[in-house]
Amino acid sequence: MISVAIVGASGYSGEELVRLLLSHPDAEITAVTSRQYAGQPLGRVFPKFSNHPRAASLTFTEPDPAGIARVAKIVFLALPHGVAAEMAVPLLKLGCRIIDLSADFRLRSGAVYKDFYAHDHPAPDLLKQAVYGLPEVYRTQIKNASLVASPGCYPTSVLLPTVPLLKAGLVKSTGIIADSLSGVSGAGRKAEVDYLFVECNESVRPYGVPKHRHLSEIEQELSIAAGESVTIQFIPHLIPINRGILTTLYLAPTNHFADEKAMAELSGKIADAYNRAYGKEPFVRLLPGNALPDTKNVSGTNVIEIAWRLDPRTGRLIVMSAEDNLVKGASGQAVQSFNVMCGFAETAGLQ
Amino acid sequence: MISVAIVGASGYSGEELVRLLLSHPDAEITAVTSRQYAGQPLGRVFPKFSNHPRAASLTFTEPDPAGIARVAKIVFLALPHGVAAEMAVPLLKLGCRIIDLSADFRLRSGAVYKDFYAHDHPAPDLLKQAVYGLPEVYRTQIKNASLVASPGCYPTSVLLPTVPLLKAGLVKSTGIIADSLSGVSGAGRKAEVDYLFVECNESVRPYGVPKHRHLSEIEQELSIAAGESVTIQFIPHLIPINRGILTTLYLAPTNHFADEKAMAELSGKIADAYNRAYGKEPFVRLLPGNALPDTKNVSGTNVIEIAWRLDPRTGRLIVMSAEDNLVKGASGQAVQSFNVMCGFAETAGLQ
Amino acid sequence: MISVAIVGASGYSGEELVRLLLSHPDAEITAVTSRQYAGQPLGRVFPKFSNHPRAASLTFTEPDPAGIARVAKIVFLALPHGVAAEMAVPLLKLGCRIIDLSADFRLRSGAVYKDFYAHDHPAPDLLKQAVYGLPEVYRTQIKNASLVASPGCYPTSVLLPTVPLLKAGLVKSTGIIADSLSGVSGAGRKAEVDYLFVECNESVRPYGVPKHRHLSEIEQELSIAAGESVTIQFIPHLIPINRGILTTLYLAPTNHFADEKAMAELSGKIADAYNRAYGKEPFVRLLPGNALPDTKNVSGTNVIEIAWRLDPRTGRLIVMSAEDNLVKGASGQAVQSFNVMCGFAETAGLQ
Amino acid sequence: MISVAIVGASGYSGEELVRLLLSHPDAEITAVTSRQYAGQPLGRVFPKFSNHPRAASLTFTEPDPAGIARVAKIVFLALPHGVAAEMAVPLLKLGCRIIDLSADFRLRSGAVYKDFYAHDHPAPDLLKQAVYGLPEVYRTQIKNASLVASPGCYPTSVLLPTVPLLKAGLVKSTGIIADSLSGVSGAGRKAEVDYLFVECNESVRPYGVPKHRHLSEIEQELSIAAGESVTIQFIPHLIPINRGILTTLYLAPTNHFADEKAMAELSGKIADAYNRAYGKEPFVRLLPGNALPDTKNVSGTNVIEIAWRLDPRTGRLIVMSAEDNLVKGASGQAVQSFNVMCGFAETAGLQ
């Protein structure tokens, strides 16, 4: 059993970490922190955990690095950006390994961070050692990392469907469009009028147009995959579901497919690229036949669904993905990295 | 008072026509038909209408052209495609003017109809005389039309934001992408498992990928606006709201905007094009400032909201629209055409 | 045209008053106030009103009694309890007639107010002159009232179904139970975590058990109807809809109905009592046949639906009602009182 | 590993059985039947199961008793009433143990069955041997049962909160009222207009008033607990959530509590009764402090939440419960009985 702490355990992704790690066969939660709820038993703040045998002894504490380092080997940070780095610095010095769910260590460049997050990076020296926590792409690096930057929810939904195609040279690195739809939990447990039930129910709306913060990490990772600088169009929308992200990607194949034969050939190559990349991945579901992604089929799970269609009318490749923004898009993926870091079965606690 | 009949009054768009026309100052509903409910009072099938003073005398009847023509000057057809044409032919012969909400008369070409709807057109001779019922574009032609083909819900959400830009030559006619999100009423009042509450709630899913039927009329009308053949990418998604369509359009300006000055100039031209087209239109809301479309702000109304943003990172123009699929996307637009046909104030019964 | 002001126009019931009064044939909104939005045009804060011809000239102002009294004859107060009374006192002195949507003037007794609202009544002298604004019960008194206390949403849903039965002596005044389900707009446009989309969606929960504030006015009015002191059981629940209250009432008929004949006789008397009370009321829908109330059939309207069933197994009478909490439960009912006060058709602006 | 079959695996409770039993440590699903999907792989019909290692080999078959008995020791029947009995008879003869989720074997009396289900009982001889599968009440009997009749969703939500109070003589057996709110999955995966998304969203409605079928088993079990014949009032409502039942019970304590001392004493007795009954039950959560039940806190779990309040104003005891209708109200409870029958930990596969 590895001892773990969850810092910022009262937000939606923190709560989801608690849910997953309480049932993890090889992890033992030894600390849950929350400034707001410090001193209160976990089961009183979240009644749904109160029946869990392992939850009985857990009480929210203030986020004190020394205290955390005393009881936990691996620390999950579920904090706002900027704040996460302030915790990571002392915890790393105290010998903890960190899985950070914020955006603080996802970018390799402090300058890009400042451009997108509007303040200087709080710990630029750590950017080099941080590993981007997308196990399907960086499994080897995650294994020995002391600081894992777990990807954002939108980036996961864009990167997993796109990276294999770029790596295989099957689609152009220019002109990529990602149109994403997110459930409201993506906005966090924040008391703001915009996210009240009445304001979201029977409502759909784009936001963050045209420069959303997640663009920075999406473009960084697509550029690495493509081997050249990639700029994409990314438009997020808020839709009235609790959990889930559905992303539709508009891509241009590098080869035209003017006739049926060319189309069949290209289809074969795309299928191959996906099968090579994900055929043995436990959390990527390549949809067969007529099936298309649906967030309800991944809700509560660490699975991302991917389907694709070539459109002979427009010459485009349409790729669609569905994930649970709080699981594969956040806390489940963080636990997956945790499993990799500890040498556990990658599906431990996630099935 | 003009006497009107609603044929197929028990589906969602038929029901919405009843709602709008019951309160119309210059229309009198004299017949509502429904094979399923023939013989039953309107107020018993739809209790919400039972308190309306004008509804008391209305009883569903079988859809008999001769009977309808005897009591109604203008007939709204809210029927499935194929069936609508079968009613339109005799009603036109009997002297009625028709506003058809189906797809039967929206296309100028019977061949395109067959390609997209998979059967021969049931009344190809009428295609020439039919007018596409988008008042903001075809107001003059609607005025004297005997057969108005009211546009589809998706087409309305795509055409109104795009047509002025194409006409002004501000965006390229190639590479257009329309990503649309529709509420479940768009599927009609059909008893199918896919549209059950449990299957739609907490679910988002693309469908009809990549060749949805509405493409045919969208491309026809965009081609007319552009003066050349236009092929677009259109991907619809089903989201858990009752009413509303949100469409995000990805467009390429004909001129680059490499610096701020060029961007400001292009912005001015786009604003001008929209203001010229819609500045005096009562049902098009060009959103100012930071506002973005939201379906909840148009729900139950005949208004379409439009906002746009230039993205200097990608060189693209993003245009977003929101409408109520049952009102501006169907029955409200049909009533708007009715007002034009009758010389009434175009907002009569729609405010 | 009567000039009206809406004080507190940015909450849900204030916004609904704006919607209804903008389209009212005999009212002209001359002032809308909101501390939060003072100085901003109405159409910018609520884009959905921006297309309305009458809304163009309206800008939110600070709630200044003298300024309001200068431009408005009748003032709607859509403010929290306690605050409403502070506005009512000066406005009445300045000669305005008031329709107050808060709880401040609904109770005849300052002591009961203090018991339920936990502070001294801010203007006890006005309690005597205030009229409870339930037009179906107090139409005559509303006509000449200078201060109308518009009923709460839950009380309306309980009182309209119950009062005629108590007045007719058909049900016992003891043992009454009202089980109510309310949409989330009933909680107001307040930025609280409990009312976030994610906290309300896929959630149902009782609250305010067992002593909700609305009990005070419900029991006051039931006691008047019964001619004796009435204490009831009232349990509200929060359900994930925007608008609507569904109330189920458990009542004991004064006469047993041991056999079919007695049951038929009692049924006749109940039907008679309802028909006498509401047969000609434009906003009460007595459901015939097998129909049961459904909030979706009253959403956006000023109608309350009522149905009832005798249960020979238990000897009870079950009465069910459905209303839109923001219309018949708040702003629509206030406009109905306004119509009565001004001698307009009671349905003006409400159909 | 015990081999199990799920007959009727394509409805909501069948699908939920698949979900729970796929992850059960001691069960192996060897057959899933569905007339509609016979011949199709499980993972194609339900993509969400396709990644599960144990699901790969499962294909829907026709419901053939001999074939099922060959591969399964315990058979779960998730079929409509009437049909379930037809399968149970041959399967029992073939030596299988049965857990039936339908209503067919819940009643001890064939006459009551006919009164509520409107047809003769299809296998009256089996009624005597069937055990009502509420483990918290009938654990001993379930252990050796060959035919377990798993309780209905509403009955579970009523019985667990009420039985301990009746057994302890703390509440009267007369005048009990149960007001219940159910999510739409309770209606089953049936293609009916009433359960379409658009008909349920933004809608709340009572139904089955006043004589719902579940009354029969509720009253049977309450009568056993009370030691005398009990008739109750039960009114169900449909609310727009996928999963969950919230039941509010109105009960009359046998002793009055006129003063604070009597109230404290009665409170102590009620708390004692619940603690004795459920203090060690893994799936009953007695809510402490100010907490009230909320369906979102039990969604997806086998837990029922219970809270209660004495109301000194009315002399009543209000008890509220929340459960997931598909888990504790159906499939989870069935698996709980399965665990009891097999001598497994009762929480196996349910945490």
Image: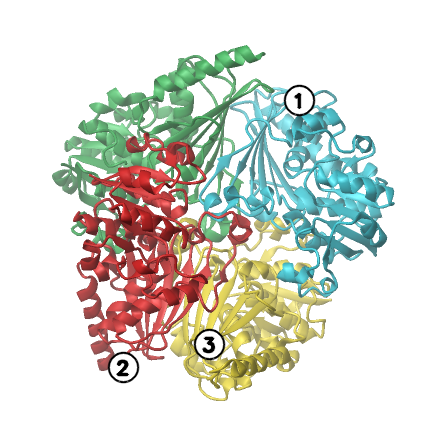
Chain colours: A cyan, B green, C red, D yellow
What residue is shown with label 1? Answer: A173
Residue in view at x 27 percent, y 81 percent: C257
Can the viewer see residue B58 in this picture?
no
Q: What chain is tagged by disc 2?
A: C
Q: Residue at the location (33% across, 22% down)?
A: B108
Say which residue label 2 marks.
C257
- Gap in Å between the C-alphas at discs 3 and 2? 31 Å
Regarding mark 2 in the picture, which secondary structure is present there? loop
Task: Point out the frontmost of discs 1 and 3.
Answer: 3
Mark 3: which amino acid?
Pro
Q: Amino acid at mark 2?
A: Phe
Q: Quadrant of residue A265?
A: top right
- Name the element at disc 1: loop
Read off the chain for label 3.
Answer: D
Q: Quadrant of the image for the N terminus of chain A?
A: bottom right
Disc 1 vs disc 3: Cβ atoms closer than 8 Å? no
Q: Is residue A76 above or below residue D3?
A: above
Q: Which residue is mark 3?
A: D312
Seen in the picture, residue B123 relative to D320 is either above or below; the reply is: above
Q: Residue furthest bottom?
A: D227
Mark 1 surroundings within 10 Å by alpha-carbon count, few (fewer than 14), some (14 through 19), many (20 or more): many
